[in-house]
Each structure stands twice: as C-alpha cells, then as structure tokens.
C-alpha cells in the first residue's frame, strides 16, 4: 500500500507518520527529514536546500523528485510506504504517479489531517522552543502556510479528481488519539487493498 500523509505545517504529519508507519509495518519516507539530513551533512544538495528551507519556501520539484525516486527504488520500499511531506506540488504528484504507474502501483490512500490555523501556529511556535528548527520562526511559518495554500492544497484536488481514496482525519487531540484515528483509517484500507 502506498499512502500519503497530508496536512499543513504544524498539523503533526511527521510525528504521526513515523508512529503510524511503525505500527503498521510501513516504510516512513519524509522528504523534510531527508533534506535536513543533507543539510546537516553539508552535501552539495544540502547546501542548495538550506537557505530555501530556512525561508519557508519549497526546494525545487526536480531535486525532491530525484531524492524520492532513488529512495523508492530501494528494496525496503517494496513493503508499504507512508509518504510524509511529499508530494507538495501538483508537479511532484504527477511525477510520483508516473513513477508508480511504471511499477504497476498507485497512491492508494491519502490521509488529510485537519487542524485549525490557530492551533497550527501555537504548535509550531512551541516546536521552535523545543527543537530549534530554523523554519519555525513566525515569519518562516507564515511563509510555509502561504506556500501550503498556494502550492500544496491543489495536490488534494489532484488526487480527488483521480478518484484516489481520501481519509479526512481530525488532527486535534493527544498524539495517541490522533494516531489511533489514522491507524483505523489506514487499516481498513490496507485490508481492502490486500483482499484485491
Ligand atoms: P517538512 O519537514 O516536511 O515540514 O519540510 C521542511 C522543509 O523542507 C519545507 O518547508 C521545504 O522547504 C522542504 N521540503 C520538504 N519536502 C519538500 C517537498 N516535497 N518539496 C519541496 N520542498 C520540500
């Protein structure tokens, strides 16, 4: 099963995706984590991505698509995959669809986390205190939210139009409670996919 965890900055995508993937035995692929790792290792790619990430903008589609393509080609991606932070633009979604079609696969389900804007802002500013992420400042957060609305929300439309199953999940509540809702949404779907 190929699933996408979808939601605005601060919606808990990363936290939830890593928990839920572990519980369901899926591979968690987070482009934000992969890029932060490149930045920390000061690779050429990391040096290119760092200022863009710090400002709250998106790194180029070509770069992210290359990173995902090589990750999905590794053997551990043959089990179920939970994508987190990708695709973030319609171009990325189309590139992903093409990659998967080549392997006889598709995005089976998209989990859309719903969290009101005031809660998002509060969470991100709290995370800034705890983790010190360079893109959790108020300015960078505002930019990330604008980018999400302009570039990423249309991805939901793309998958709605292609008839992909969309699971809307309430993202407000304790980490455990939200994880439980997502596991439930995905488990039902996994059974259906496996029965095909
Ligand atoms: P995240 O950890 O998913 O919030 O990602 C942190 C930052 O990494 C984003 O604000 C972008 O600058 C960059 N990034 C992560 N995933 C992508 C993607 N799929 N496309 C473009 N930029 C991305």
Image: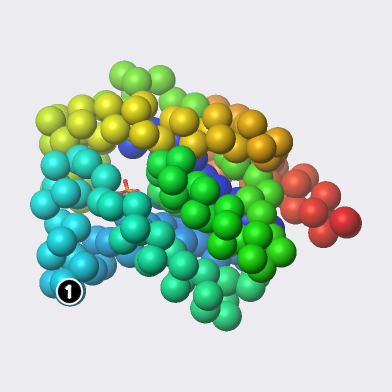
Residue at 56% x, 62% y is: 99
Residue 11 versus residue 15 in the image, above or below: above
Q: Residue 187, image x and y in percent?
A: 73, 49
Q: Residue 8, image x and y in percent?
A: 39, 33
- Tell me: is circle 1 under 8 Å from ligand 1: no
The answer to whether any part of residue 158 appears in the image is yes
The answer to whether any part of residue 33 appears in the image is no
| Residue wearing tag 1 | 43
Say how the picture is coloured: rainbow
* Quadrant in which the C terminus appears: bottom right
Q: Nearer the viewer, residue 83 or 73?
A: 73
The 10 Å Cα crowd at callout 1, few under 14, some 14 to 19, many 20 or more, is: few
Q: Quadrant of residue 178?
A: top right
Q: Residue 81, image x and y in percent?
A: 58, 61
Residue 72 versus residue 74 in the image, above or below: above
Answer left or right for 27 relative to 138: right
Residue at 13% x, 65% y is: 47
Q: Quadrant of residue 68?
A: bottom left
Residue at 40% x, 35% y is: 152
Residue 106 versus residue 44 in the image, above or below: above
Answer left or right for 102 relative to 31: right
Q: Residue 195, image x and y in percent?
A: 88, 56
Label 1: element kind: loop
Q: Quadrant of residue 91?
A: top left
Residue 85 versus residue 136 in the image, above or below: below
């Amino acid at each position: 099963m190929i699933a996408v965890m979808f939601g605005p900055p601060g919606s808990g995508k990363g936290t939830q995706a890593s928990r839920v993937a572990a519980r369901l035995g899926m591979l968690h692929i987070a482009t934000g984590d992969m890029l932060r790792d490149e930045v920390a290792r000061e690779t050429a790619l990391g040096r290119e991505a760092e200022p863009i990430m710090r400002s709250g903008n998106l790194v180029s589609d070509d770069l992210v698509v290359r990173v995902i393509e090589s990750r999905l080609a590794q053997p551990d991606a043959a089990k179920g995959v939970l994508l987190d932070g990708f695709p973030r633009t319609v171009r990325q979604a189309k590139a992903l669809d093409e990659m998967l079609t080549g392997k006889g696969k598709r995005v089976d389900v998209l989990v859309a986390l719903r969290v009101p804007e005031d809660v998002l802002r509060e969470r991100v500013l709290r995370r800034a205190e705890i983790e010190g992420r360079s893109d959790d400042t108020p300015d960078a957060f505002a930019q990330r939210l604008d980018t999400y609305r302009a570039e990423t929300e249309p991805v939901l439309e793309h998958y709605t139009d292609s008839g992909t199953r969309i699971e809307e999940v309430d993202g407000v509540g304790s980490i455990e409670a939200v994880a439980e809702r997502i596991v439930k949404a995905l488990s039902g779907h996994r059974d259906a996919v496996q029965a095909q």
